[in-house]
Amino acid sequence: MAQANAIPQAAAVQGSALRDLRDLLWASIDNDTSRDLDQLSVAEPMAGDATKILVAVADVDASVKRGTAIDEHAHTNTTSVYTAAAIFPMLPERLSTDLTSLGEGQERLAIVIEMVVDAGGIVKQSEVYRATVRNRAKLAYNSVAAWLEGAAPMPSRVAEVLGLETQLRIQDRAAQAMRGLRHQHGALTLQTPKAEAIFDGDELSDLRPDEPNRAKELIEDFMIAANGVTARFLAEKGFPSLRRVLRSPERWDRIVALAGKLGESLPSEANGEALARFLTKRRREDPTRFPDLSLSVVKLLGRGEYELELPTQASEGHFGLAVSDYTHSTAPNRRFPDLVTQRLLKAAIAAEAPPYNNDELLALASHCSLQEVNAAKVERQVSKSAAALLLSSRVGERFDGMVTGASEKGTWVRIAHPATEGRIVRGFENLDVGDRVSVELVHTDVERGFVDFVRSHP
């Protein structure tokens, strides 16, 4: 904290290797309350219905040098932790929400991933370089999405910045083409009901599913493409990298069984395209229950993890995104692997040697994967305590739910209101992930985050 407080201002660098892109119509789209802004985007129409897309990623490394006290703290935690009670940032807030954040009206250093995308959503050309940028408008997912979908008027900030309306529609069209192409290749349509804490003043009032929308999809599509460009750029420069991988699911047989219960058939061997078609159909035919189905599939797919990849090595790829080249590079304020990747990128751009050797990257991949699991446990634990608090007066009530976990460690069920998981402590025999079940709430413990159910029968 002393080191962070001693940093006088945001980093600034001048030189011929740094492009000045401050006059472009950059904008951020994030959650309403987000202040740790990692990326901006802007687009330009080109001949033949192609689009040039630029993604600017905050140059966190310019302020957080390797081996400093701040860097060592980030290296230990590896991620910001977002809970219903509080946010525990990877970097001191003086940096993550100010000096290294791409805040509205601020001139900042950035790594820019430039992509030319054709009308079919294919990235035809790409480039990676350093630049200075300025955020013209801090926008929010929900209001931008409602406007793009025709359900609400244009956000006031969009109307106030000349040319921004056209700019966002260009980005939306390109993102839709990119998304369509990925789904043709087997990218999975998933809608996991992650709970968002709702407060009435300082009092917790509800846990509601955080719904997907068109603006979130726009940013997701750009980030997936930018991360793919980053991975390929490092490989072309002969650099090792930290790849984000999700292997073929070990419990594919259970996914096949879930599809069978819904009158659909999937091949006996894992097949991303077949699964994507199944999920798209279910989302169209039964949107109400689709989040539950999505959660079952996510549980059965398993966790993504970080892996060292050498430039001559074949990539494991990401089964869920249907991409073979994928890293994490677009959120260096929030994730340490992204900061490591940024340092690799800057060295590659400058034609310098990699700042990490293979053994260091291998150790980082393992450590970051582990800490991601630990962070998820913290977030889940606080969410359970929040749910226990909301449900403490409802012992004896019955709920309809879906089994989200079944192993020797226990059987878990998810209910919709409030959106939470609890353990089935009696009557769990023969239940498996994806089963629908009626349960009765029998016990809550706020401090320990316990929400216990027993299986009930009509």
Image (spheres, rainbow, N blue to C red):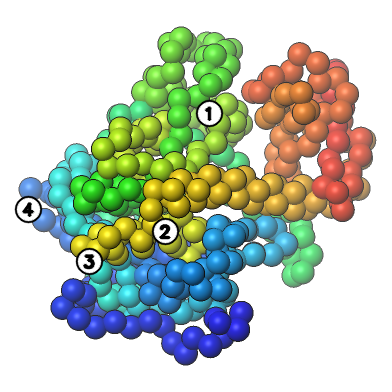
The residue that disc 1 covers is: 301
Callout 1: SS = helix
Does 119 sit left or right of 313 as displayed? left
Count numbered badges in the picture: 4
Residue drawn at 53 percent across, 21 percent down: 250
Callout 4: SS = helix
Do we see residue 349 in this rendering? no
Label 3, label 1: how far apart the Cα atoms are? 39 Å
- Please tell me which residue lies in front, 155 or 69: 69
Disc number lying in front (4 or 2): 2
- Residue 47 tag number: 4
Q: Amino acid at mark 3?
A: Ala
Q: Amino acid at mark 1?
A: Leu
Residue drawn at 56 percent across, 20 percent down: 251
The residue that disc 3 covers is: 350
Does 414 sit left or right of 358 as displayed? right
Instruction: Check if mark 2's residue and mark 3's residue have beta carbons within 8 Å.
Output: no
Callout 3: SS = loop
Q: Earlier in the sequence, mark 2 or mark 1?
A: 1
Above or below for 1 versus 84: below
- Residue 340 tag number: 2
Residue 305 percent coordinates (x, y): 50, 40
Residue drawn at 15 percent across, 49 percent down: 125
- Please tell me which residue lies in front, 333 or 180: 333
Disc number lying in front (2 or 1): 2
Residue 355 percent coordinates (x, y): 36, 61
Q: Amino acid at mark 4?
A: Ala
Q: Amino acid at mark 2?
A: Val
